[in-house]
Amino acid sequence: MARAPKNDLPMMSTEEGIVLFHPHIPKKAKEYVCDTLDSRWIGQGPKVDLFEARFRAQFHQPGPCISTGSGTDALHLAYLLAGIKAGDEVLVPLFTCTATNIPLLYIGAKPKFVDVDPRTLNLSVEDLKRKISDRSRAIVCVHYGGLPCDMAEIRSLADQYGIPIIEDAAHALGATYAGKPLGAISEFTMYSFQAIKHLTTGDGGLVTFLDESLAPLARRLRWFGIDRTDKQKGIWENDITEVGYKYQMTDIGAAIGLAGLEEFDETLAYRRALYRRYVENLNHVSDVRIVDDFDPRKEHAAWLFTILVEARMDCQLKLRSRRIESAQTHFRNDRYTVFGCNETFPAMDSIDDRYLVLPLHTRMSLEQVDGICEVLREGW
């Protein structure tokens, strides 16, 4: 097959073949949404409170859980709650959705990119050690694809410098590290409930944190700086003393989320079964390297299955010729002008055109995974 230009292919439809992503809509979502539409509350109301309480209990989160309109909203709140201010240097992953790092620009903080670990596509602990300094005010880490970062090593560095960790767990709901659920390890953890995540609320997010005393501030910042518990007292009894935002979840979104919580264990187990099937099929294929370090401390959430290959675009074209969608779904942030970065990142350079994400979602079968792997075994 001729070498292809470096561009992504148009999105496929479900009628055309096996798509890369597909939303998982819980069985009771329509019932719960219709119940909400027939009620008094469609904005932030009692179902939001119920969703937060059930999420905290189900995922064993030790601190308050504050839901938001998006994962990006939740990360912005986490950065504010962590005390990050204009001019502060924050260590962040180079390879991630820009939603991880853009909220730091809202504040006027300075993201300092950490190179990638080519085995996992998480941030490199070795590069983190080189770049952390007395100027660093926080460490942000992303659990790429659902694979936890090396949290013991990151925790040690954060403690050494006396700074907080903010985990972007947008991919990693259900993952654990050393037997602990994410959200129980670091000062702040964010989850995303965007359309194609394990658990969706249409779009939404949630921030959890270990310091219970931050909950009233988090709830005010989420809703214009207003204390909703006191708002009925009248404007002069309910002063606004800090800049807040319109970041709340709605009861419509929470209704979908509540339905998703009820079947989350089944959803996660199925995604993990698909992931394991990929590993079994591809573990000994010489032209394919699986992005995973298989560290026994880490329990993968199986949101993405990513491989490293040579001639990546040719591989994509071969898969597409068999009606299989694949893509590079995240990109290095240093190439975006908005971040103004002029550093070099040798590890990212080494895998920049080699990583490829394969389909993994609940509309797939194990047999379809087998078929995708058979195409890869044929070569491209």
Image: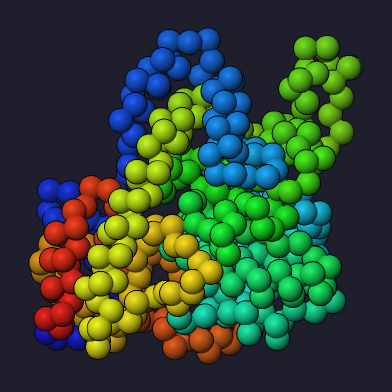
Quadrant including the C terminus? bottom left
Q: With 133 as the anchor, is 52 left or right in this view?
A: left
Identify whether 248 is placed above or below 183. above
In percent of width and height, residue 230 lies at: 80, 18
Coloration mode: rainbow
- Residue name at image x 76 percent, y 20 percent: 229
Q: With 106 as the anchor, is 284 left or right in this view?
A: left
- Residue name at image x 69 percent, y 36 percent: 222
The foreground one among 300 and 241 is: 300
The part of the image, by quadrant, that contains residue 225 is top right
The foreground one among 290 and 196 is: 290
- Residue name at image x 44 percent, y 62 percent: 300
Q: With 277 as the anchor, is 170 left or right in this view?
A: right
How many numbered marks, from 0 up?
A: 0
- Residue name at image x 77 percent, y 27 percent: 226
The foreground one among 180 and 33 is: 180
In percent of width and height, residue 102 lies at: 61, 58
Viewer can see residue 106: no
Identify whether 231 is placed above or below 346. above
Identify whether 149 is placed above or below 43. below
In percent of width and height, residue 126 lies at: 63, 85
Viewer can see residue 62: yes
Identify whether 10 is placed above or below 281. above
The foreground one among 235 and 133 is: 133
In percent of width and height, residue 369 lies at: 19, 63
Quadrant including the N terminus? bottom left
